[in-house]
Amino acid sequence: MNEYTVFLSWDDEAQVWIAESDDIPGLVLEAKTADALIEEAKLAALELLELMDIPPHSLKLCFKAERFAVVA
């Protein structure tokens, strides 16, 4: 099984989560919530990897999230 990493980061100015992946060319998405973004990323990853002739049965995504907040 192939594992692909998807990075989630919060854009404070736009108030959206952004997904990007170095492992899956073309995967760049945004959504209002991290959960919604993960669901969108799953579908997009399947489509993009299919275009790269990678069979869907070998797909495992690892989501890594990062959000910074100014406290003081």
Image (spheres, rainbow, N blue to C red):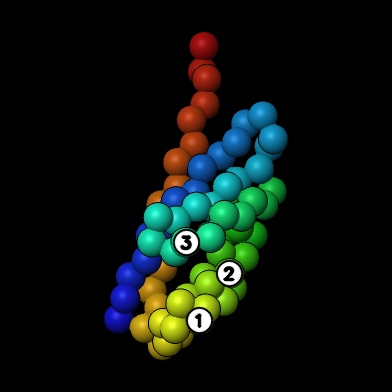
- Calculate the distance from the C-alpha at mark 3 to the C-alpha at mark 2: 11 Å
Image quadrant occupied by the N terminus:
bottom left
Q: Residue furthest top?
A: 72
The residue where tag 3 is placed is 25
Q: Is residue 38 above or below residue 8?
A: below
Q: Secondary structure at mark 2?
A: helix
Looking at the rendered structure, the kind of residue marked 2 is Ala
Query: Could you say which is closer to the camera, residue 67 or residue 40?
Result: 40
The location of residue 61, given as percent across then percent down, is 41, 68
Q: Taking 12 as reference, is 65 left or right?
A: left
Q: Which numbered marker is on residue 50?
A: 1
Q: Is residue 39 above or below residue 6?
A: below
Q: Taking 2 as reference, is 47 left or right?
A: right
The residue where tag 2 is placed is 44
The image quarter in which residue 35 lies: bottom right
Q: Residue furthest front?
A: 52
Q: Residue at x 44, y 51 (%)?
A: 7
Q: Which numbered marker is on residue 32?
A: none
The location of residue 67, given as percent across then percent down, is 49, 37
Q: Residues within 10 Å of mark 1 (few under 14, many from 20)?
A: few
Q: Residue at x 44, y 83 (%)?
A: 53
Return the disc, 1 or 3, that comes first in the chain's sequence: 3
Q: Secondary structure at mark 1?
A: helix
